[in-house]
Image: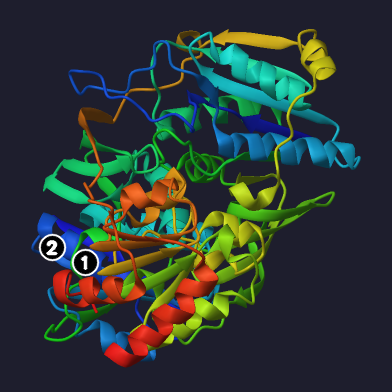
Amino acid sequence: MAALVLLSYEQGNTLRSTSLSTITAALQLEKEVDVLLVGETLNERLDQAIHLNGVRRVLAAKDPSFAHMQAESVANLMASLASDYEFILAPANAEGKNILPRLAGLLDVQPISEVTKIIDKSTFVRPIYAGSLLATVCSKDKKKLLSIRGIAFTPIKTIGGNAEIKEVTLPSPLPENQKSIFLNLKLSQSNRPELEAAKIIISGGRGMQSSDNFTLLEKIADLLNAAIGASRAAVDSGFVSNDFQVGQTGKIVAPELYIAVALSGATQHLAGMKDSKIVVAINKDPDAPIFKASDYGIVGDIFEILPRLEEGLKNRI
Amino acid sequence: MKILVPVKRVVDSNIKPLIKTDHSGVEISGIKMSMNPFDENAIEEAVQLKEQGKVDEIVAISIGEPKSQDTLRTALAMGADKAILVSTEHTLESLAVAKVLEYFVIKEKPNLVLMGKQASDDDMNATGQILAARLGWPQGTFVSKLELYSNYVEIIREIDDGQETLKLPLPAIVTTDLRLNEPRYASLPNIMKARKKPVETFVLAELGVDITPRLYIQRLDESSPIREGVIVNSVEELIDKLQNEAKVI
């Protein structure tokens, strides 16, 4: 049997790095790994996908109903392909977590979310309790549906592969009352690296006090080619939009360097960044829990420290 | 208009979970238990919709040991009208929970199932989607804003690059993000009133729903990378350490 990986794209034709990590996970389970490419138009994406390293076949499903990756139609399509696969994987991002459990419902399988380690073909490790515990779980299902936490698997190379293309026969469309209707998408504009792929992240919390003060972080991010993140409190306060959120209910990241500025370090936030290689905390409260989750800390007023950090970095790098 | 809201009794999310000495599970005896925080958002939203006159009845449902009745009483005190307790000694996985919920959706005929996007204990984030698939209903997951109309619901979902607006024909499943609202605390008079509201009890084993586990937990472990938490005295020292000690910039 083989494994099937649902590919996930940013707006445009950029394949998400979490998709590349998911292929790595699939290759740990099966030699034969196919990827499923779903969309309204596929040409450019297909040209890239056939070169993905280690991929046997690219299943191409082109239809206007897939334009916004709505769970009802995509899960319906995947269910029609499922009989050829023992493993079906998707990245544990908003898209994968929307679609894969719906597929599980169609196939009568208990899905396994946010897998961080594969022990063997039926044993997997996944975080629970906001990442404070790791559960090793065995699945008795014949077919395994896994969502894969990107940071836990090294992405495969996007070159060197030579996959064949197979056009997929589409199942009959769902009745109108069984699917969601897309109305609009509000994208956040950013020229910075994707949070999940960034080597350096600088995140702000409630202590940033305003949206304007995030420019202090942006100046430093510019120098380090870093992505900007935020705590839930900062998003709830309206300083930045939801897609900046790092944590249990936001993005899960593990950069080389994570700089946490004016955020206390609630469990929910730590759940999203605790696997970072080096963590720096900048906070005026010496008792903030973030210091216990950091390698280096500075206690003090961020409005004095951040400009000095910017200046110091300018001189050193 | 009728809304069904499933609620789960979990270890209070402010408490650090303790692993049993044999690593087989999490210690819950003598531990403070609360309603799953995501479910509080679901109840709150249902109650707000009822206050706006858009909803006639809110039914809360919980599957678990008899003490889940406490969680249902909280839901009733927040404003649910009626509660259903499905009593079982077993811990159910999302697939089994979805099957039990499906049984009660067919029985209660709600127009909307509003539920937490995940439970703060197992973080599986799956029950709503599985239930939607089994019923053949449209789904709106990770919802941070919701407008209910007579035959559809318009939602804003939190996704990877921003926010998406969808319209779901009813009946539908909506799963809530924490950002949807600020759950209320039940007032004392409402807690008193909740005691008089009806709680129907069912024994899960008598319903004929297949709850066979598909997963078993081999073991649980702590997950906390140890960090030294060195406090540096200046920005210069920090930059020096990042460059020369950690070598990350």
Q: Does the rendering let one see residue A178?
A: no
Decide: few, some or many residues near mark 2? Use Cα within 10 Å; few <14, some 14-19, many ≥20: some
Q: How many residues crowd around disc 1 within 10 Å: few (fewer than 14), some, or many (20 or more)?
A: many
| Residue A312, above or below B64 | below
Residue appearing at x 37%, y 79% in the figure: A226
Q: Which of B91 and B212 is in front in this view?
A: B91
What is the quadrant of the N terminus of chain B in the image?
top right
Above or below, B150 against A308 in this view is: above
- What kind of residue is marked 2? Leu
Rendered-image quadrant of the C terminus of chain B = bottom left
Q: Residue at x 20, y 59 (%)?
A: A3
According to the picture, the residue beneath numbered tag 1 turns out to be: A23
Q: Which amino acid does label 1 sit on?
A: Ile
Task: State if disc 2 and disc 1 touch (CB < 8 Å).
Answer: yes
- Helix, strand or loop status at disc 2: helix
Q: Mark 2 lies on which chain?
A: A
Mark 1 to mark 2: distance in Å? 6 Å
Q: Are marks 1 and 2 on the same chain?
A: yes
Q: Percent position (x, y) of residue A309?
A: 40, 79
- Looking at the picture, tell me which residue is in the foreground, B5 or B236: B236
Q: Position of residue A168 (x, y in %)?
A: 34, 72
* Percent of width and height locating residue A187: 58, 77
Give the residue at x 13% y 83%: A161
**Element assignment for label 1:** helix
x and y, in percent, of residue A32 in the image: 12, 65
Q: Name the residue under label 2.
A: A27
Q: Nearer the viewer, residue B243 or A173?
A: B243
Tag 1 subunit: A
Query: Is residue A29 placed above or below B112 in the rendered structure?
Result: below
Instruction: Tell me which corner region of the image, top left, top right, bottom left or bottom right, holds residue B157.
Output: bottom right
